[in-house]
Image: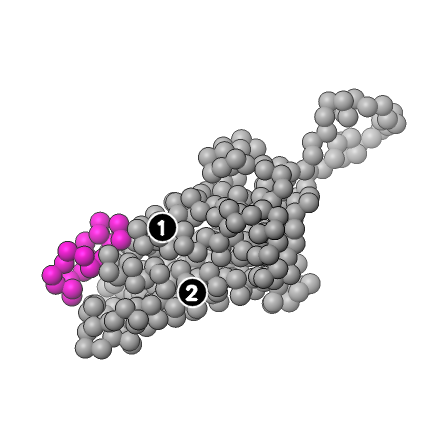
Amino acid sequence: MAEKKVSLPAKLINGGVAGLVGVTCVFPIDLAKTRLQNQQGVQVYKGMLDCLAKTVRSEGYFGCYRGAAVNLTLVTPEKAIKLAANDIFRQRLSKDGHLPLWGEVLAGCGAGTCQVVVTTPMEMLKIQLQDAGRLSAQRPVPTAAQAAAPGPAPSLVATPTQARPTPPRRPSATGITVELLKTRGLAGLYRGAGATLMRDVPFSMIYFPLFANLNALGRDDVQAKAPFWQSFLAGCSAGSVAAVAVTPLDVIKTRLQTLEKGEGEDTYRGIVDCTRRILRREGPAAFLKGATCRALVIAPLFGIAQGVYFLGVGEAMLGLLE
């Protein structure tokens, strides 16, 4: 399939803008996905809608955007690398304007491999922030009987801080980063890198060839740019198929990258140990936890990304600068 060549700076701008728009639109669903995937024993949430409703009720509307700052900061280089790398590999592997299926798959593999450099620390920080609300909801709240139980008489000179327990401090991306670098070094931010690679490479190998072929349907002139609606629908369709296909790998990655566990929840020593423990304790169905959420996140995310990308926002911005 012959494609119009676009400069690398334009690719990077397109990918960055696309990522910002897409993440802003679907982040609350991504938060629900992370919390549902991390549930092991205590079922705090019954499903995506229940998770979002309880999050808004207990943490406010902006509680649905916990970890969004990290994602919005790092999604620009992540999406830029992913989309630009795929285009570059496709151009390098094309022969006489034609790219065979194996070339499309190989280009997707290369794109997925390149993005892991940014994706792993981004996901690592985002998951801790997203899951904090679920862990808080698991902590027992004193009942009325417990509160009324006899105890030592309160001091008449007790300060307000002595009279009531202070709530646990909410984690921050900066605090988590500093703690990880201090205790585990740079490797702490890349915990679960193998699982991230194991998820992102197959995703890209499925997504990019499928998108390219859907985006070319019904067009006699393959050199022409696809209309926005076709790029959007192709991105949504290819994204949802690839997302559901790799959901088991995403569950493993999420579990491995979660640092703080709830009461009675397993910790894992690696990919094989995580897979074995999930199968033994929760059964095969656990590997599809959050699959609906993941499809609802990835479909519009990549639909918007590809739509913005093919609108040529980067080319327009570079044109204004000139």
Q: Which residue is mark 1?
A: 240
Q: What is the tally of numbered marks visible in this picture? A: 2
Q: Is residue 316 above or below residue 163?
A: below
| Residue 183, horizontal then vertical, whole percent | 69, 63
Left or right: where 155 falls relative to 109: right
Whole-angstrom CA distance, mark 2 to mark 1, is: 16 Å
* Location of residue 206 (image quadrant): bottom left
| Residue 226, horizontal then vertical, whole percent | 19, 57
Left or right: where 107 falls relative to 40: left
Camera-nearest residue between 307 and 170: 307
Residue at image x 62%, y 59%? 273
Q: Magenta region, mostly helix, strand or loop? A: loop
Point out the stretch of residues depicted in magenta. 215-234
| Residue 122, horizontal then vertical, whole percent | 51, 58
Residue at image x 54%, y 55%? 252
Please tell me whether mark 1 sits on a helix, a strand or a loop.
helix
Tell me if residue 257 can be seen. no
| Residue 37, horizontal then vertical, whole percent | 53, 47
Please tell me whether mark 2 sits on a helix, a strand or a loop.
helix
